[in-house]
Image (tube, rainbow, N blue to C red):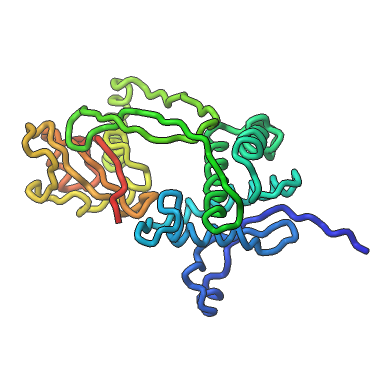
């Protein structure tokens, strides 16, 4: 008798036209997981469907009156990959993925092996950020299984952390926010990206401006506002109205140089839309923006957030 072969857990995407023809158009855009046989992993894929359609999340826990917007396609792709990694880990270690204890099997076992490198593709320790993302998804999966009656009680030890956040209606003002975080999270690198001196950047922009005005304006937009490259590339003439009278100023009682203008980015964002709070600044070159949509030398990002649906 031929010995059964184990296949690696794999993430795949269906043919959308085929699923739509058979009446499954709602889930045709979602990834799914194959197990080691390889077969359709029923529990894992039901989890991805519930999360992908916004029918379940950590915050709503399946409550109909507290619906949440569905994650983006990129987020769902990551969720599927992280979940497949955990399921394969459980299969290789002979563990039941729906009977895992947070402290022993997940924090000490799964997380510990990723940090030591014993569970990684190259046998090298994974970064704290990668480990925390994977373990966070595993905890989501366990909570979903608990809500669906697929496992017993699951408790995640948490700690409270307080940090400062920028105020959207003030210049330089900050407030504090307290959140609960998972106890035992891997330590993430605190290294920050080092930028050249402002004089060096200014000289580089001037040289770039002589070479290509458009490229210089794009670069200045990214430097001054911290928009992503894709967002800058998708900046349109109507992103910020040409007439300042049409601007949405959130603190009109402040002097003009400290006023903040709300701008909604709808294209090139990682989410469906983003709201930027920009501080206006008097500048003779600001008039050039009305001829070229890239110019933003009079803007400074104060806050980025995702609007409620």
In depth, the one of 145 and 243 nearer the eye is: 145
Quadrant for residue 101, please give it: top right
Q: How far across and down, in percent of the image, does residue 256 sit?
A: 8, 34
Residue 130 seen: yes
306 sits left or right of 121 in the view: left
Q: How far across and down, in percent of the image, does residue 198 sit?
A: 29, 22
Which residue is at a point 7% across and 32% down the rendered structure image?
255
In depth, the one of 79 and 199 nearer the eye is: 79
Which residue is at a point 21% across and 27% down the rendered structure image?
172
The quadrant in which the C terminus is found is bottom left
In depth, the one of 282 and 18 nearer the eye is: 18
- Please tell me whether residue 2 is drawn above or below residue 126 in the rendered image: below
53 sits left or right of 213 in the view: right
85 sits left or right of 50 in the view: right
Which residue is at a point 53% across and 49% down the rendered structure image?
143
Which residue is at a point 64% across and 47% down the rendered structure image?
85
Q: How far across and down, in percent of the image, does residue 39 sit?
A: 70, 63
């Amino acid at each position: 008798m031929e010995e059964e072969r184990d296949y690696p857990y794999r993430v795949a995407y269906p043919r959308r036209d085929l699923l739509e023809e058979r009446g499954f158009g709602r889930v045709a855009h979602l990834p799914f997981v194959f197990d080691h046989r390889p077969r359709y992993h029923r529990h894992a894929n039901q989890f991805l469907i519930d999360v992908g359609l916004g029918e379940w999340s950590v915050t709503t826990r399946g409550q109909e009156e507290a619906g949440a917007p569905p994650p983006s396609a990129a987020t769902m792709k990551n969720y599927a990959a992280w979940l497949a990694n955990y399921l394969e880990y459980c299969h290789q270690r002979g563990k039941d993925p729906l009977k895992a204890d947070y402290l022993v099997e997940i924090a000490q076992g799964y997380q510990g092996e990723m940090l030591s490198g014993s569970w990684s593709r190259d046998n090298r320790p994974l970064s704290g950020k990668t480990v925390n993302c994977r373990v966070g998804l595993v905890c989501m999966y366990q909570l979903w299984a608990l809500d669906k009656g697929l496992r017993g009680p699951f408790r995640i030890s948490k700690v409270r952390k307080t940090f400062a956040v920028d105020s959207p209606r003030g210049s330089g003002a900050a407030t504090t926010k307290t959140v609960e975080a998972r106890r035992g999270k891997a330590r993430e690198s605190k290294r920050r990206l080092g930028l050249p001196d402002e004089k060096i950047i200014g000289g580089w922009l001037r040289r770039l401006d002589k070479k290509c005005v458009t490229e210089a304006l794009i670069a200045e937009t990214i430097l001054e506002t911290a928009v992503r490259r894709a967002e800058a590339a998708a900046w349109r003439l109507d992103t910020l109205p040409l007439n300042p009278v049409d601007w949405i100023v959130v603190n009109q009682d402040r002097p003009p140089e400290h006023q903040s203008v709300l701008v909604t980015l709808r294209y090139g964002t990682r989410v469906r839309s983003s709201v930027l709070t920009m501080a206006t600044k008097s500048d003779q070159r600001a008039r050039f923006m009305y001829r070229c949509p890239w110019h933003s030398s009079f803007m400074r990002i104060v806050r980025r957030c995702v609007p409620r649906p």
